Image (cartoon, rainbow, N blue to C red):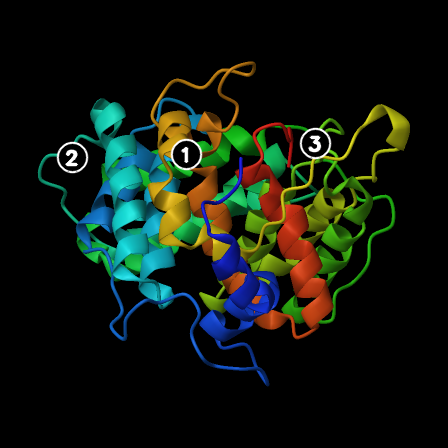
Amino acid sequence: MSIPSSSATLARREFVTLFTGIVGGLALPGLSTSSAFSDDTGRAALDESYLEKGLTGMARSQGWFNAHLGAAVLAGYYLCRENNLSDATVAGIKKQLDALIDIHAKQFEPFPKLKADEKLIEKVPTSLQPAVDGGLRAHGHAVIYTALSVRALRDVPHMAGPQLINLLCSHNGVIAKKTPVLPKKPVDYPDSQAMVEALFDSLARFEPLLGRPSVRRPNFTHMTTHTEALMTLESLGYPELAKVGQLGQQAHIAEPVPEFDPAKHPLDEHQVTLHDVMSKEFWESEQNLRWWNKSWSVDENPNGYWVAFGHLFKVLYSYHRVVKRIQDEDKVRLCSQVLLERYVNPNVQGG
């Protein structure tokens, strides 16, 4: 799949599509602040009902895995709130969030008469501790869910009812029972900046896989969302908990680069940047809409999974947050291609 664009537009925006869209739109330190993301001067956003829906969808999940759906709605809300996206891009994101909610309507059914108590919010990060002690479990989902839900609960504290809070905590409880994986060579990050830089160093190692979709990737998506979630936990006031979680993050990003014979894995290049994926063309693409709005199938519709379970929203939310910490232009360009290739080329599996 390629992003619809005229050759003339690509020629004019060659550098933009490689890099300026990222650093300009995100106002990275020391770099251009002109926005390449927005088609207008206003900031479009979603209303806070999406926080209510997202928390509900997480809490009502039957098992921790389908809490992806509610977490996606929260991530989509913050993605739109934090970044200067065009109205058209926000409309495209909203359309897909609404479709996700409609398809899984039972999971997003509002709780009747929640009796909120803001003090209960602290139960969620407390429940995370056993799920991060000793290493990596479930691709960091307990960390990811906790960071998103605590952030949202602070923004809409009227949702902090005992039933909803207990259900959120129960997901962490199930994940905590899994056997943890330790990194082979643990390191002591001096700060969260070092952790984020380690993520980008890890992603950059996978450059040889670019353009070779038949080589299966490790899970770059969750490496990114896991790292960002620990960063966010620290910013929310839980530095010690985030520090404990860094052991699992190190195990996560240490996945080896697959060995492969280039002769057996032909090139199928799909140049991709964050600017491409945040464009209205990406969100309005008829081909994308067909993939996203039909049932996932490993053979016929592999990309449907990434919106159906909300990974696209979560990775874009997280990547927008961590990429602001990196000033190396070449590394940002490379890591964007490594991470986002999965989202524009349905032949790429894993990632």
State the residue at coordinates (41%, 65%).
Answer: 37
Residue 88 lies in quadrant: bottom left
Q: Earlier in the sequence, mark 1 or mark 2?
A: 2
Q: Which residue is mark 2?
A: 111
Neighbour tally class for label 2: few under 14, some 14-19, many 20 plus, Cα within 10 Å: some
Q: Which three-letter amino acid code belongs to the residue tagged 3?
A: Pro
Q: Which residue is mark 1?
A: 288
Residue 110 lies in quadrant: top left
Count of numbered circles in the view: 3
Q: Which residue is mark 3?
A: 213
Which secondary structure, mark 2? loop
Point out residue 174 in the picture as x, y percentages from the top left corner.
Answer: 50, 28
Point out residue 229 in the picture as x, y percentages from the top left corner.
Answer: 52, 54
Q: Nearer the viewer, mark 1 or mark 2?
A: 1
Q: What is the CA distance from the residue labelled 1 to the residue labelled 2?
A: 33 Å
Q: Which three-letter amino acid code belongs to the residue tagged 1?
A: Asn
Q: Which three-letter amino acid code belongs to the residue tagged 2?
A: Phe
State the residue at coordinates (10%, 34%).
Answer: 112
Q: Earlier in the sequence, mark 1 or mark 3?
A: 3
Q: Earlier in the sequence, mark 2 or mark 3?
A: 2
Q: Which residue is situated farthest in the bottom direction here?
A: 30
Residue 34 lies in quadrant: bottom left
State the residue at coordinates (66%, 70%).
Answer: 193
Q: Nearer the viewer, mark 2 or mark 3?
A: 3
